[in-house]
Image (spheres, helix red, strand yellow):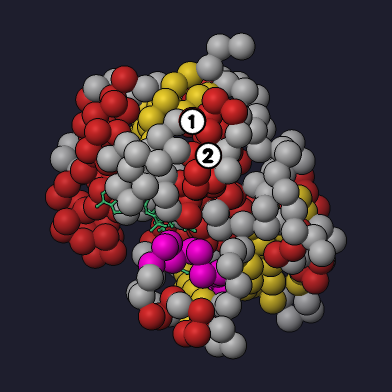
Amino acid sequence: MHTSPVAILGGSGYAGIELTYLLAHHPRARIEVISSDRWVGDSLATHLGIEGKPGELVYASFEEAAERAKSCAVALLATPNEVSAQVAPKLLAAGCKVIDLSGAFRLTDDSSALAYYGKEVVGAKGDVRVGTYGLPEFFRDEVVDAKLIANPGCYPTAATLALAPLLEAGLIDRTDVIVNAVSGVTGAGRKSTEAYGFVAVDQDVRAYRVLAHQHTPEIAQVLSRRAGAEVQLTFTPHLVPIARGILSTAYGRLSVKASSADLTTALANAYAEEPFVSVVRSPNDVSLKQVVGTNRCVIGAASDASGRVVVVSAIDNLLKGAAGQAVQNLNLILGCDEVAGLTQLRRFHT
Ligand SMILES: NC(=O)C1=CN([C@@H]2O[C@H](COP(=O)(O)OP(=O)(O)OC[C@H]3O[C@@H](n4cnc5c(N)ncnc54)[C@H](OP(=O)(O)O)[C@@H]3O)[C@@H](O)[C@H]2O)C=CC1
Ligand SMILES: CC(=O)N[C@@H](CCC(=O)OP(=O)(O)O)C(=O)O
């Protein structure tokens, strides 16, 4: 079967490694070039145990890979924001489509982009300001024809999948939405600083970047677009001592009378045709073990007599929150089955 050549830049990072596993034996894409300055010259077999011909591919320096990527059909960027901001315009100019896993091209509002990502990122983007937001469940039709896809952030994927259908249906008040979420440590990338080391995170839980996290404007942007009016949001992320996974708990207020069953039905109807989103009977039925190692998002909602709404959702930050979603977008761009390469994933349900 015909396979399209793709490039992975940032192949040695947590997200890049997941991309490599997902694409090494993909039915419609083949990794033509992959970058890692730390592993340059080594093979995929050496570091990841990938078998057969794909395992023989060797990591190229970023500089070389970025050049060779220009002749690929699609480049997947699993690089820091400022690196993506700089390289994406060059790849696009050469005719290569880009799926960027960083946050560099997600925010449509320039002042938010500047405030949360800084001059270095915004300045490097040139004329290419923003990408098509690659959340297939909401923007599939745009993704199919996109040249630059801004792959969503991990927290925004979990939070927006949970809340958007309820806001769209006018079931919850858009002026007071709260999201608390916990993330595993891989969410921070391969940082070797003391703050992310085993001793620092083990037996500890903490909130971080309170009222200042870069995913706040991203979640608000997507929810506002779906709701058709501005959504006011407070978002607080927490770091927990697990390797991977995000569990998001969203709070809202009913704007009309609706039972837990009504909310569950609204979500189930919204995602009835979605291969990667499951709606369960109760928020108590959502857990990380259901999703880690898969491209799935599991969602459960409930309301009480006071009008309080709670929606819990879970994803694997490295799959539905990063590499899995990127491959879902790649499948759409390549015109193949959206679930290609994403259905045989492992689950850690022990
Ligand atoms: N981790 C997560 O859960 C998620 C991550 N993302 C985003 O995906 C991107 C990758 O994240 P993650 O895998 O966690 O990050 P990592 O820190 O684990 O990996 C970063 C990768 O980028 C490469 N790299 C680092 N600096 C440079 C540079 N200056 N020039 C070229 N290459 C460079 C590294 O390669 P080497 O050192 O070998 O050269 C490595 O392969 C980031 O933008 C992140 O925000 C998005 C959603 C979720
Ligand atoms: C635990 C942890 O540190 N998580 C990261 C997740 C962000 C991320 O992965 O970056 P994107 O914005 O590209 O999605 C953070 O909070 O910054």
- Comparing 181 with 341, the one in front is 341
Query: Is residue 152 part of the magenta span, yes or no?
Result: no
| Label 1: few (<14), some (14–19) or many (≥20) C-alpha neighbours in 10 Å | some
User: Can the viewer see residue 147?
Assistant: no
Q: Identify the residue shown where x is 70% and y is 64%.
A: 288
Q: Quadrant of the N terminus?
A: top right
For this view, does 234 lie left or right of residue 281? left
Check contact, mark 1 vs mark 2: CB within 8 A.
yes
Give amino acid for label 1.
Glu
For this view, does 226 lie left or right of residue 124? right
Name the residue beneath numbered marker 2: 45
Residue furthest bottom in the image: 203
Q: Is residue 268 above or below residue 53?
A: below
Task: Estimate the x, y position of residue 135 in percent, counting from the top left.
Answer: 53, 43
- Comparing 54 with 305, the one in front is 54
Residue furthest top in the image: 1
Q: Is residue 112 above or below residue 137?
A: below
User: Can the viewer see residue 345?
Assistant: yes
Specify the segment rendered in magenta.
178-191
